[in-house]
Image (tube, rainbow, N blue to C red):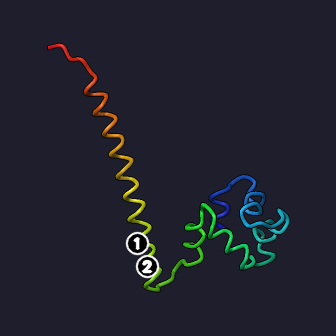
């Protein structure tokens, strides 16, 4: 539920309900700890756009080799995305620099 609160600090139950395919009331019960989430709802969350964050929360503390490999693969992908963003910034700055007219 911490992932839900982090993702949706406002209207948490409403957003959780929409992602999990349940009523807002049931989502509020889950957030309050009155009921456990169903496997079907967890399945929907893991397959959502924020799925990795939910999966990581479920697997927290796991020492399984396959999970450690998955965590590292995710971190590599994140780092590669950062490298691409920085490279695009460098390319934009170089293009601006080439358009400058410098009088000596």
Q: Where is residue 78 in the image (x, y as percent from the top left)?
A: 42, 60
Asked which quadrant contains residue 50, the reply is: bottom right
Q: Position of residue 95 (x, y in %)?
A: 30, 31
Q: Is residue 7 left or right of residue 69?
A: right
Q: Quadrant of the N terminus?
A: bottom right
Residue at image point 54% right, 77% down: 60
Residue at image point 62% right, 70% down: 46
Label ID, residue 62: none
Q: Is mark 1 on a helix, strand or loop?
A: helix
Q: Residue furthest left?
A: 104
Q: In this view, does 36 lie above or below 88?
A: below
**Which residue in the protein does label 1 denote?**
72
Q: How crowded is mark 1: few (under 14 residues within 10 Å), some or many (20 or more)?
A: few
Counting labels gives 2
Mark 1 in CB contact with mark 2 (< 8 angstroms): yes
Q: In this view, does 100 lie above or below 29?
A: above
The Cα–Cα distance between marks 1 and 2, rounded to whole angstroms, is 6 Å
Which residue is nearer to you in this view: 31 or 96?
96
Q: In this view, does 5 lie to the left or right of 73?
A: right
Q: What element carries label 2?
A: helix
Residue at image point 40% right, 55% down: 81
Label ID, residue 68: 2
Q: Which residue lies furthest to the top in this view?
A: 103
Q: How crowded is mark 2: few (under 14 residues within 10 Å), some or many (20 or more)?
A: some
Q: Where is residue 25 in the image (x, y as percent from the top left)?
A: 85, 65
Q: In which quarter of the image is the C terminus?
A: top left
Q: Is residue 18 left or right of residue 65?
A: right
Q: Position of residue 30 (x, y in %)?
A: 77, 71
């Amino acid at each position: 539920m911490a992932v839900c609160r982090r993702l949706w600090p406002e209207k948490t139950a409403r957003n959780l309900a929409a992602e999990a395919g349940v009523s807002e009331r049931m989502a509020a019960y889950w957030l309050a700890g009155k009921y456990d989430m169903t496997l079907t709802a967890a399945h929907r969350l893991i397959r959502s756009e924020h799925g990795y964050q939910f999966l990581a929360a479920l697997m927290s503390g796991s020492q399984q080799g396959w999970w450690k490999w998955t965590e590292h693969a995710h971190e590599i992908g994140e780092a590669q995305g950062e490298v691409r963003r920085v490279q695009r910034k460098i390319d934009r700055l170089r293009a601006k620099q080439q358009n400058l007219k410098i009088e000596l």
